């Protein structure tokens, strides 16, 4: 049994048979990523993402045309950088590793990460025996990143994501089910 708690009817021409995402924003608006519709003749151009306010009025919309496909869209606050300084919304004082999504997975997922501005970070995937089986990311903190993890050849099992920064380590479990 499912209970409908909210809906938004955009246009009867928008449909999706794969992907998509919805998130409630801190301001009460709702951000909708429509996914893709693969019809008989390929991808049909359509709206990629829509933001609606609490009265269901469209306040933002974008479309990315073929051949691009948007698996999932997120909305982040943006404060324009000045003099090469990172946006205030991206600056953090701690190492951050999000929850892998999807988790469990069929082998490929994504994870969000960030670190203090300028701090070097490394993200690795380890198997249950502690073997490093995939180097996922090398870079610097200051700007949040979304990173692909896993592969189609990972066997069923539990894995550990390890994000290392200067003097700090953060980890998350990642599960593959086939």
Image (tube, rainbow, N blue to C red):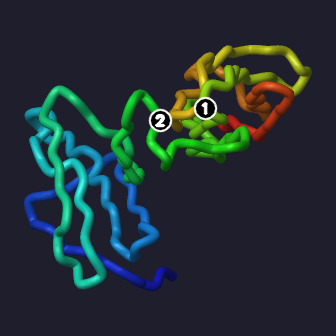
Q: Which residue is mark 1?
A: 117
Q: Which sits in the foreground, 65 or 151?
A: 65
Percent x, y for residue 137?
Answer: 61, 20
Left or right: where does residue 78 sit relative to residue 44?
right
Left or right: where does residue 65 sit relative to residue 164?
left
| Residue name at image x 65 percent, y 35 percent | 115
Percent x, y for residue 59?
Answer: 19, 67
Q: Secondary structure at mark 1?
A: loop
Label placed on residue 134: none
Q: Which residue is mark 2?
A: 86
Extreme residue in the right direction: 129
Asked if residue 85 is positioned above or below residue 61 in the image, the reply reads above
Chain-order first, disc 2 or disc 1: 2
Q: Secondary structure at mark 2?
A: loop
Q: Are marks 2 and 1 in contact (CB under 8 Å)?
A: yes
| Residue name at image x 68 percent, y 40 percent | 97
Asked if residue 2 is positioned above or below residue 22 in the image, the reply reads below
| Residue name at image x 27 percent, y 76 percent | 53
Q: Which sits in the foreground, 75 or 2?
A: 75
Question: Separation of disc 2 and disc 1 at Cα?
Answer: 8 Å
Quadrant for residue 69, please give it.
top left
| Residue name at image x 40 percent, y 83 percent | 4
Quadrant holding the C terminus: top right
């Amino acid at each position: 049994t499912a209970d409908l708690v909210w809906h938004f009817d955009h246009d009867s021409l928008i449909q999706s048979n794969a992907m998509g995402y919805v998130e409630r924003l801190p301001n009460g608006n709702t951000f909708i990523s429509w996914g893709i519709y693969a019809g008989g003749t390929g991808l049909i151009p359509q709206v990629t993402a829509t933001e609606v306010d609490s009265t269901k009025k469209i306040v933002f919309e974008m479309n990315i045309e073929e051949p691009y496909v948007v698996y999932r869209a997120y909305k982040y606050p943006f404060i324009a950088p000045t003099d090469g300084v990172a946006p205030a919304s991206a600056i953090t004082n701690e190492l951050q590793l999000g929850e892998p999504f999807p988790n469990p997975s069929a082998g490929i997922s994504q994870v969000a990460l960030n670190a203090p501005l300028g701090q070097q970070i490394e993200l690795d995937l380890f198997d249950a025996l502690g073997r490093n089986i995939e180097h996922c990311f090398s870079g610097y903190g200051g700007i949040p990143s979304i990173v692909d993890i896993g592969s189609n050849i990972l066997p069923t099992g539990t894995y550990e994501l390890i994000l290392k920064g200067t003097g700090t380590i953060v980890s998350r479990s990642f599960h593959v089910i086939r």
